[in-house]
Image (cartoon, helix red, strand yellow):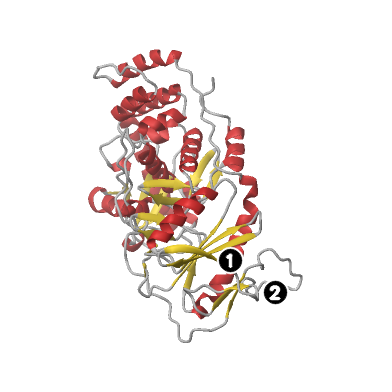
Amino acid sequence: MALYPPTSELFDNWINNKPESKLELIDGQLVVGNSLIGSQLLLRQILQGRRAEAAIALAPTESWLQALAAGYGLTLPKLDSPLEILNLLEQQIVDVEFIAEDLQAGRAEKTWTHHRIQQQLSVDSFRLANQAGCESLGRDFVMRLGDDGFTPDLIFYKSQGLNQLFSYFLSGPAELVIEILMPGHEAADRSTKFEAYQAAGVPEYWLIEPESQQIEFYRLIEGRYQRHQPDSDGYYRPSSIPGLAFRADALWQEDEDYNPLEPKTFKIEQPVEGFQQVHAEEGPQWGSLLFIPNIQPSPMPIAFEEYISWCPRAKFEFIEGKPLIGSTPGTRNVLAMLLMTFGLESAVKLLPPQAWIEGLRQRLEWEQKDAERKTEWWQLAHQAAERLRTHFNLGRLGVIGDLTMPQPLNYWSDITLVHWENFDESWKAFDVLRDLDPDYRIDLLRFQPEWLTADQLWHIERHLVEL
């Protein structure tokens, strides 16, 4: 039995069955595409594409051994040697039959209409929101309700008592929240989010159903959502944003005379004079916390500050046979939060047990050869520094990351160089370094504290090695 599907199969599954590109925090869990099934599916896709080693690097070997034994009903030998334990566990899994769970997160072929509507609403609202005395934000911007973080398809906010704008999230309920339903993902919008938005006091909640070409308008009255209809002229006027009107049927109508430079769905009936955009307050943001995920055999809750600091933009891609979520660090962070959401004992059931055995063997082999690997990596770091000085006349250069730390290199380790000088056409530096060794990833950072993550600053302050 093959431990991993071929790349062509992984690609087909990614295209046809990947969850909706939404990363939200609900009840301390990372929810992908509106459901925990979507979270489980994305976790399996990452594990299949990047292999077990990617996850194994994020938790101690002992934890994985315990999880493997518990997940597949094996007897964990009481031995001190991880390699001997692996050998005995491998003997036990001979009789284990692995059956992959059928995970369906939605119907990916129906997403085009969803994205078209989302784009239309985003463009229209961006043009007109200021005239209505508010601002609009689209996907990936988080609305914090309590300890949960939601990313609606579109929100309108005023930050005048009901909510407060921070750099990476809106704290409190927006004045208007719009969700566009997608086949296979409707339950969360109609139940989980409906109840959460109602309880938090979101004044207006709209549900748009592309397949049936219907829009449900819910208005909060005495703490409960009541459904409303457009006025007799076909426009719906939200109570929370006076002067804003929405043409309910415009999304479905084909208008040959439509001017793409003019809003199609919204209009302003009472412009607000002298509106000034809200200044975003400082707060938790990408990279503001050290990346220290609490990954255990059992599920562990994710704090809102951890979610904001670690969660990348929900850009789902498939490159060279591997899922990529935002970036390589973003993919690592999503994987870690998914492991926290489900726990290791559940995660091991997503791959055949032999895949974990081989991944753990790989880790032990890397640890045994760590000194040799680091020597090779240091040689590459010095070669990279020499090239940068030759091509760009750079002065101060240093190395940070796992290469300068006592712990062994792992799946996610890279060679990170830091420079202090600003130079023209700095983008060319990546071309200069790209062909140094295609098997290793060399990252290049300029020392600009305001743009660096807490991890990067911590390494620079404490573990930088000058070259």
State if disc 2 and disc 1 touch (CB < 8 Å): no
Identify the element where label 2 is drawn.
loop
Does residue 328 appear to the left or right of 299 in the view shown?
Answer: right
Residue toward you, 345 or 50: 345
Identified by mark 1, the residue type is Leu
Can residue 391 be seen at all in this image of the molecule? no
Quadrant of residue 264 within the rendered picture: bottom right
Identified by mark 2, the residue type is Asn
> On screen, 334 above or below 130?
above
Can residue 96 be seen at all in this image of the molecule? yes
- Crowding near pointer 1: few (<14 within 10 Å), some, many (20+)? many
Does residue 225 appear to the left or right of 268 in the view shown?
Answer: left
Q: Residue at x 45, y 54 (%)?
A: 193
> On screen, 146 above or below 134?
above
Can you give x and y, in whole percent of width and height, for residue 232 in the image? 64, 75
As measured in the structure, the alpha-carbon distance from the residue carrying label 1 to the one carrying label 2 is 15 Å
Q: Give the position of the N terminus as an image quadrant.
A: top right
Q: Residue at x 27, y 19 (%)?
A: 81
List the residue tagged with mark 2. 259
List the residue tagged with mark 1. 121
